[in-house]
Amino acid sequence: MTKKIAHIALFAIAIVALYFISEKCFFRIDLTSEKRYSISDNTKRMLKGIEDPLSVKIYLDGDLNPGFLRLKRATKEMLDEFSVYCNSDVDYEFINPSGAASNAEREKNYAELEKRGMRGTLVHDRDNEGKSIQKVIYPWAEISYAGKSLPVCLLKNVAGNSGEENLNISIENLEFGLTDVIRMLTCREVQKIAFIEGHNEFPEPFVYDASQALSHYYQVDRGVITNDVGILDGYKAIIIAGAEKKFSEQEKYVIDQYVMNGGKVLWLLDGSRISLDSLSTSSQTIGIANEINLEDQLFTYGVRINPVLVQNVQCALIPVNMAREGDQPKFEPTSWYYSPLLMTSPEHPATRNLTPIKSEFTSSIDFVGSDTTLKRDVLLATSPGSHIQNVPSIVNMEVINVERNAQYFNISNRVFIGVAEEGVFHSVFRNRLIPEGIKTTEKTRTESKPTKMIFVADADIIRNDVQGSGENMNILPLGFDRYMNQQFGNKDFILNAVNYLTDDDGWMALRNREIKLRLLHKPAVIGLRTFWQTINMVLPLLLLGLFGLGFFFIRRRKYTK
């Protein structure tokens, strides 16, 4: 009896000791191959620094199909993981916007969500009787912190992917999407970026949508470069978009020394210049080289923007009047080869899982030099089937009549349009005198600190359309094609590009997270449906019968003896 009591006491002591050890030594083990239930160290550090409670409303509830149920479950698991490491409370609730007592109340719920920037997604589904039905789903979450709220879209819809693939991409991006909004809400120090002016760059209305999107992360300024070398020192990154006038040597020196001191630059430059006004009035114009005195500087940094125009078979559509002169106008959508739809790199965090990017009168870009210290990545490229038009040359509407044949679209390889470089750059002024008029007391820095730059051979990627003027001005969303009624990935690309350039902590690496999609082989499932149904019904009964027979004979043999 005494020994038994001692064993019980030791067991109780072991349980208590294990409890205190688990309190002090917290750990979690994720046994999945892609670590789908783990969050990054950056996320853990950020959550531990949160002082006030986080409140999350997820508008993904109700009658959902299996795919959206999987997204809902993954969101819950991610928030549960956040609550484990968060220094404060993480309160979340799932809300069904369609769960209203009347149609009027339901429409009111929808309108309220749309007003706050959360757009519904139309989903085609089937009811219990197999009839095709349509549902409105709101795959959004709204995160609130310290009196501020921001929405985050949980569904990533990449054109060309199946529903299962897009839902899998959405689950891959959950941690990045949620932490991105949390970082915006909890950020105390706002970094600054700037659009460079003074060379006929795009005016503010034509980059308004990109500026507004960037303003959620940064203080966005605009200004000209002076002769003061330190004028750009306070900016995390600068954007040069659509320059058409030549840069002076003094301005080039200021930008160069900014890069040498670790500054980041998003270059959005056209290799050729087109007069769109002439094209709209006379159906033809002239394409000429866009000479802005940056060729030597870009060459030193390892790239060359070619003075050409790229046409591609995968392109946007424009409405063209096909009626004869004097007849009633009849507009039909026609391929506009001067507006290639650019493919994005699936390996780079700035472009992974983005829809195609719409371009307009784009040029090509090449890597030059053999600097092995630079990490080089292609971000944007055309699909196979391109034609290169050298300038100066005539650009007219007759290109819409060109047949899609290999004789004209004779470039089977991809044409590079956007690239990224990372590493140590050399100064274009390393063997030159400091330009006259520069205000500096420092020597020319000839080798940069480790930094990053992105080069895009089409400035129109950041340009949004503008209708009207003055008080009647209407800014259209960046990347929205009103003729095709389609939203392209231009705004997401600009956001990702700037965030990649300014990311010193590795947050953008979360966009490269990959979760393997393990789907059943549909033809095999359909073809062997009866077989597997039979197996699932008969096999358990067969195993149960064999167990019963075995048990019967064992007992009979045992008790017969």
Image (tube, helix red, strand yellow):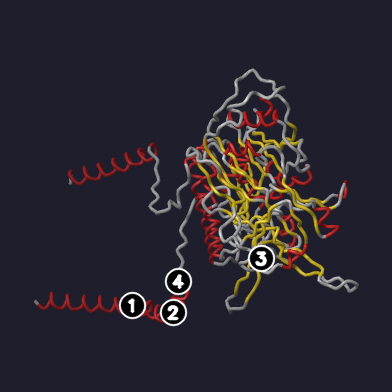
In this rendering, does residue 211 appear at all? Answer: no
Q: Earlier in the sequence, mark 1 or mark 4?
A: 4
Q: Which of marks 1 and 2 is nearer the N terminus?
A: 2
Q: Which of marks 1 and 3 is nearer the N terminus?
A: 3
Nearer to us in this view, 84 or 224:
224
| Residue bearing the label numbered 2 | 529
| Amino acid at the residue labelled 4 | His
> Callout 4: helix, strand or loop?
loop
| 530 sits left or right of 342 in the view | left
Q: Nearer the viewer, mark 1 or mark 3?
A: 3
Q: Which of marks 2 and 3 is nearer the N terminus?
A: 3
Q: Quick check: 333 above or below 28? A: below
Q: Residue furthest right?
A: 326
| Residue bearing the label numbered 3 | 122
Check if mark 2's residue and mark 3's residue have beta carbons within 8 Å: no
- Residues at marks 1 and 2, CA–CA distance in whole angstroms: 15 Å
